[in-house]
Image (cartoon, helix red, strand yellow):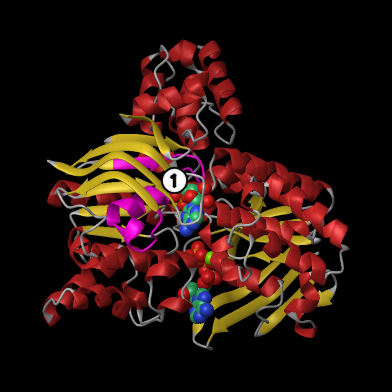
Amino acid sequence: MRAIEVRNLSYRYPGQSDYALLDLNLNVDEGEIVLLTGPSGCGKSSLIRCINGLIPQMYGGQYEGEVRVLGLNPAVTPTRVMSKHVGTVFQNPDNQLFALSVEGDVAFSLENLGLQRDDIEKRVREALERVGISELRKRSTFELSGGQKQKVAIASILALSPKILLLDEPTSSLDPLSARSLIETLVELRRRDELTVMIAEHKTELLAPIADKMVVMDNGTVIDEGHPREVIERAIRFNYAINVPKVSQLSALLSEYLNSSIYLEVRDLVDALSEIGCSD
Amino acid sequence: MIEFTDVHFSYHGTIRALDGVTFTIGEGEIVSLMGENGAGKTTIIRHANGLLKPQRGRVVVDGTDTKNATVAELSRKVGVIFQSPDNMFFLQTVYDEVAFALRKFGYTPKEVEERVSEVLRFFGLERYRDRSPFTLSGGEKKRLSIAIVAAWNPKYLLIDEPTVGQDVTYRRLLVQLLNEFANEGKTIVISTHDVEFVADLRPRVILVSRGRVIADGSARDVLTDEELLKRASLVMPQVPQLLRSIPKSGVNFKLLGVEEGAREIVRLFSRG
Ligand SMILES: Nc1ncnc2c1ncn2[C@@H]1O[C@H](COP(=O)(O)OP(=O)(O)OP(=O)(O)O)[C@@H](O)[C@H]1O
Ligand SMILES: Nc1ncnc2c1ncn2[C@@H]1O[C@H](COP(=O)(O)OP(=O)(O)OP(=O)(O)O)[C@@H](O)[C@H]1O
Ligand SMILES: [Mg+2]
Ligand SMILES: [Mg+2]
């Protein structure tokens, strides 16, 4: 089934003559992991706001086109209803933390859902464990390091077990091992719960290997989409202004040895090289 | 010079953040602080501009012991860009945010106009000069926060997580900018988790873990040392990771660049 459907979406923020989104079309199936990338200012966060309904409900502005999320129209569906299905981790974690204790912050939105006390406690405990911050449970969220705050923001959304997860640069302050572990969590939840994930990221080397689909935006619209390997190939060929994983750049430089194949993962390039004789 | 000597610091006296940090950073150096979430990197930066004072030990910047100076006194010389740019903005327009400090530091109106235009152009923000800084995209906000500080040309520039929200174009621009600054004799300190950016920038790396310095060396040496990286929750950049995994003897894997990595592989092939 379709999780997200965007048809001819155009949007201008209040008082702006420039379009933040322009005639954008996109389909995401249930259970897909989609990597959304593109130059800074191309409209990734704006698209995410259209999917969770913050645009136009909170932002106002000029909105044209149609968005459907699990059949609901986020432009008119009350946020309270949308947030039962769609969880968003925002680019700046400060915007979604309330300066309570870490566990209080994670429990906050669960309490709003009207869940039972012991169910809440269990979910909070599991979410904190998943992102590896159980020991920070009693600390105040505003007195954490940048990466620790980002982990609280992620935990508080995971605790809600949404059907669709929107993540806006969720690894920007995470150390590389924590970033890896987040990616593993996403892959596991997708397998276990058919979670649908849309993740805006500049670090393509992290996500391209596990994404089902990669979408490249520029100037408010989708300029390319497809399997990450194909999109990365075109990104190299046509010089898109996006980060290309170093393994893929290396494959391109070695194309005469590799039959022009482009690899996304270190492991795969190592295998390809050993196969053509680069081994003892 | 920035000199940390056996610096200890705990928040509220209970949350230990720095546990005896010692290093010296000279003029014209580029240093990257790296290490796990909560390691103490931001706390180090807060000490360098006098926002926090060591509870034990000493911090001396440009000959001044930070115990004897306020943040305002140090700010002309020591420019700091913090992790979350939102906390830095307080004016109506992008233009005013950049102009504010320049006016305070006594630039003439003509100099202010020229300097602001120059940095906004450099960071690709000139079309936003009349917009509120709060309406920028995440990456644009980060660039504005760097532009504000770069505008007044401080002798010491400290940037917490410079690559957040930046695409490939601005990452290259940042490498160029930091190198130009260093060539002018300025001292640059960044804190980052972005191992691929560090592989491109090739700074000196100070590895911090649990409030202590656990390694201090070239990017090439530190970022290819698997044991050290693991202790600080980092991963090896892709090029050395690949070279090291090639099942062949005599591979030089201490190479960070894509081109040099490719040359090494071609050499392996030609060797047979
Ligand atoms: N509240 C707002 N009011 C007016 N313009 C805005 C607002 N938020 C974003 N914009 C503009 O809309 C465009 C798209 O911004 P958006 O935040 O969606 O980009 P992005 O792709 O998420 O960028 P980044 O990678 O830097 O986070 C940019 O030109 C930005 O300046
Ligand atoms: N304002 C504060 N009040 C209390 N404790 C704090 C405060 N800021 C940071 N800490 C704590 O001090 C320790 C060091 O934090 P710091 O922010 O220096 O880490 P960091 O290396 O910058 O981490 P990150 O990579 O996540 O940004 C952590 O345990 C953190 O929780
Ligand atoms: Mg964004
Ligand atoms: Mg920090």
| Three-letter code for the amino acid on which mark 1 is drawn | Gly
Indicate the position of residue B229 as horizontal and vertical percent values: 50, 52
What is the quadrant of residue A97 in the picture?
Answer: bottom left
> Quick one: A272 or B87, which is closer to the camera?
B87
Q: Is residue A18 left or right of residue A108?
A: right
Kindly identify which residue carries mark 1.
A43
Compared with B267, A74 (above or below) is below
In magenta stretch: residue A40: yes
Please report, as a chain letter, where disc 1 is located.
Answer: A
- Residue B26: image location, x then y, percent: 80, 58
* Span of residues in magenta: A34-61
Up-down relation of residue B34 to residue B236 (above or below):
below
Q: Which residue lies furthest to the bottom in this view?
A: B13
Give the residue displayed 64% in from the left and 73% down from the top.
B46
Question: For the C terminus of chain A, which image quadrant?
Answer: top left
> Residue at point 32% right, 61% down?
A57
Percent coordinates x, y for residue A147 in the rendering: 45, 64
Q: Which of A113 and A161 is in front in this view?
A: A113
- Where's residue A66, x and y in %? 26, 44
Quadrant housing the N terminus of chain A: top left
Helix, strand or loop at disc 1? Answer: loop
Which of the 4 image quadrants contains residue A49? bottom left
